[in-house]
Image (tube, grey):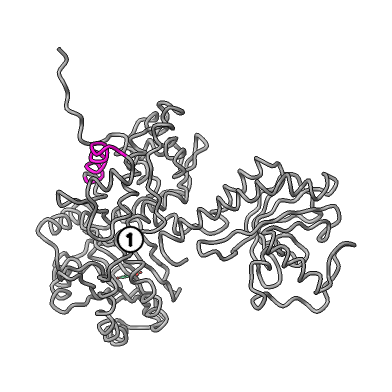
């Protein structure tokens, strides 16, 4: 009789998937990694890496051409789930902006990551730029090298203290922290002991160039109703503007004065998550379609992680997680246990919540992506689909400026590259960008607009009507007004708040057909591409708050 083996409690594919995501997110890693590099850095078999990557690609969390892989913006939903559940960016974002304006210095908020005796940033408002280092949301710092770390360490239990000692012994120069310059010689652990004792006694802490020469910071803790430190607010400056003493004298009284208000904002009841669609489990259908190339339990485990983003501070019961994902309780439970073992979630035995370590899954890297990088892969897909050159441009004064472009054949007399400018009034992208602005916000156009071709519309009244029309149609088509023989069609691209931030276009020879044929043939693809870029902008902007 075969023995009945009890089902393994942890989920292997989920564990391996997270290992790959972590390797792709490592601060030192290149934006693109070869599958073979992943094999090396994770120690997983090539076939495992390939299956993990194809699953992540299928889920839209990474993009792979079979050789190289990069993280994709939708992955931000995972760190975004932690940021939503902890509630800190939403509760403190506006106040942090006000303080940064008031001090004209960067203000940040960090949380403890006790699993590594570290500190992670959850909010950043960067003001001054003379610092060579600016930390990103999700970046991890050793507790002993920053102001918030001393505040958190003041409350460490024996286990956290052991974690710190072991980490220091294993990596005395902080080589494992890619976000801070390594130390020249090991720090004196007693110095940190003294700093944490002082931070505990005085209720504030400082960083006198612990990270790098010139960087100084002052931090105060924010506590919850039970008196536990939840996070720390730091004001960061540079010795070219402040000594540590002058920084403390300027900001500490103010930080202490607003502390109650910040703690009240943190403690305020939070609205139930809105707009979060349950992460329904569709992995079975995908599995049927893709077979062994798709790791269903990885997909399910990541859905569980995302579902915990609906937590509003009390943790979520297993039933709620199972309901939100559509998974059986036993399946959801196995995922939760794996996530717990890997340090991404914690439980009190009844309820589950996300931990700051979730921020290591792509947050810092993805939060840095600019419009051009976000749009580029979508332009590539569009060009593959319609076989015409596609571009993305922004308004710059009365001009449009190209920020991304994927050419096919050259049809313009001038060679367009990123940075090329054209007068907005004579281009399809310019017209949708102008249409996206309220009349009062539009740049003043020159009194006399030159006609660039026989067809260029230059009469202000007629241009006004055309722009109004573009606003109503949500696209613009310009037929040989910029250059003879060139026709172009553009749609707006909006950010998460609905503001038009860019325009997307395709251009073709006028000899190619009628303008109406161009509209009918290309507008749907253009609109779908704009919608895909907008979805990326939404997930990135939504996760880290204001953008
Ligand atoms: C930062 O927000 O960049 C920061 C905060 C506290 C420090 C150092 C840097 O001690």
Image coordinates for residue 296, horizontal then vertical, percent = 36, 33
**Which residue: 79% across, 53% down?**
487
Q: Say whether residue 299 is left or right of residue 512.
A: left
Quarter of the image containing the N terminus? top left
Q: Which residues are magenta?
A: 327-340
* On screen, residue 447 above or below 192: below
Q: Is residue 486 above or below residue 386?
A: below
- Is 543 on the left or on the right of 264, as rendered? right
Q: What secondary structure is marked by label 1?
A: loop
Q: Is 351 or 189 nearer to us in this picture?
A: 351
Name the residue: 42% across, 36% down: 55
Q: Is 338 colored magenta in this rendering?
A: yes
Q: Image point 31% across, 47% down: which residue?
A: 305
Q: Which residue is mark 1?
A: 272
Q: Identify which residue, 316 or 529, lies in the foreground.
A: 316
The residue sitting at the left extreme is 158
Q: Is residue 115 magenta?
A: no
Say which quarter of the image contains residue 56.
Answer: top left
Cβ at disc 1 under 8 Å from ligand 1: no
Say left or right for 448 vs 95: right
Q: Which sits in the foreground, 408 or 351? A: 351
Identify which residue is drawn at 31% across, 59% down. 182
Residue 283 rendering spot, x and y as whole percentages: 39, 35
Q: Main secondary structure of the magenta part?
A: helix
Q: How many marks?
A: 1
């Amino acid at each position: 009789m075969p023995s009945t083996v009890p089902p393994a409690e942890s989920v292997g594919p989920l564990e391996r998937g997270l290992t790959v995501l972590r390797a792709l997110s490592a601060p030192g890693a290149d934006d693109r990694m070869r599958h073979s590099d992943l094999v090396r850095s994770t120690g997983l078999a090539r076939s495992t890496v390939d299956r993990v990557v194809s699953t992540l690609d299928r889920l839209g969390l990474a993009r792979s051409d079979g050789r190289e892989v990069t993280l994709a913006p939708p992955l931000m939903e995972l760190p975004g789930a932690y940021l939503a559940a902890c509630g800190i960016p939403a509760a403190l974002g506006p106040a942090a902006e006000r303080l940064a304006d008031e001090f004209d210095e960067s203000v940040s908020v960090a949380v403890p990551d006790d699993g590594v005796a570290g500190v992670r940033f959850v909010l950043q408002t960067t003001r001054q730029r003379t610092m060579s280092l600016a930390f990103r949301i999700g970046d991890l710092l050793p507790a002993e090298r920053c102001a918030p770390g001393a505040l958190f360490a003041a409350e460490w239990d024996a286990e956290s203290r052991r974690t710190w000692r072991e980490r220091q012994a294993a990596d005395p120069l902080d080589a494992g922290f890619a976000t801070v310059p390594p130390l020249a010689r090991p720090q004196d652990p007693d110095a940190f002991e003294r700093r944490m004792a002082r931070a505990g006694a005085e209720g504030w802490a400082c960083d006198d160039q612990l990270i790098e020469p010139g960087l100084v910071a002052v931090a105060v803790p924010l506590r919850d109703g039970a008196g536990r430190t939840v996070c720390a607010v730091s004001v960061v400056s540079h010795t070219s503007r402040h000594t540590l003493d002058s920084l403390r004298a300027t900001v500490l009284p103010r930080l202490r004065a607003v502390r109650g208000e910040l703690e009240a904002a943190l403690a305020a009841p939070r609205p139930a998550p809105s707009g979060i669609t349950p992460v329904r489990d569709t992995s079975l259908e995908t599995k049927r379609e893709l077979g062994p190339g798709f790791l269903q339990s990885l997909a399910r485990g990541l859905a569980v992680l995302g579902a915990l983003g609906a937590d509003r501070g009390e943790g979520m019961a297993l039933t709620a997680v199972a309901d939100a994902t559509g998974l059986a309780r036993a399946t959801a439970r196995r995922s939760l246990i794996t996530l717990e073992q890997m340090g991404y979630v914690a439980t009190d035995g009844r309820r589950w919540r996300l931990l700051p370590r979730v921020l290591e899954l792509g947050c810092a890297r993805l939060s840095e992506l600019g419009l051009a990088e976000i749009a580029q892969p979508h332009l590539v897909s569009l060009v593959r689909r319609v076989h015409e050159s596609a571009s993305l441009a922004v308004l710059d004064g009365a001009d449009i400026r190209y920020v991304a472009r994927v050419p096919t054949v050259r049809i313009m007399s001038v060679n367009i590259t990123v940075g090329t400018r054209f007068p907005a009034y004579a281009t399809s992208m310019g017209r949708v960008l102008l249409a996206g602005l309220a009349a009062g916000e539009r740049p003043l156009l020159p009194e006399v607009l030159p006609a660039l071709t026989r067809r260029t519309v230059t009469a202000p009244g007629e241009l006004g009507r055309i722009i109004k029309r573009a606003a109503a149609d949500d696209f613009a088509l310009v037929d040989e007004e910029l250059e003879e023989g060139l026709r172009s069609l553009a749609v707006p691209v909006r950010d998460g708040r609905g503001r038009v931030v860019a325009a997307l276009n395709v251009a073709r020879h006028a000899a190619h057909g009628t303008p109406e044929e161009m509209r009918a043939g290309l507008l749907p693809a253009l609109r779908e591409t704009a919608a895909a870029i907008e979805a990326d902008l939404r997930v990135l902007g939504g996760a880290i708050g204001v953008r």
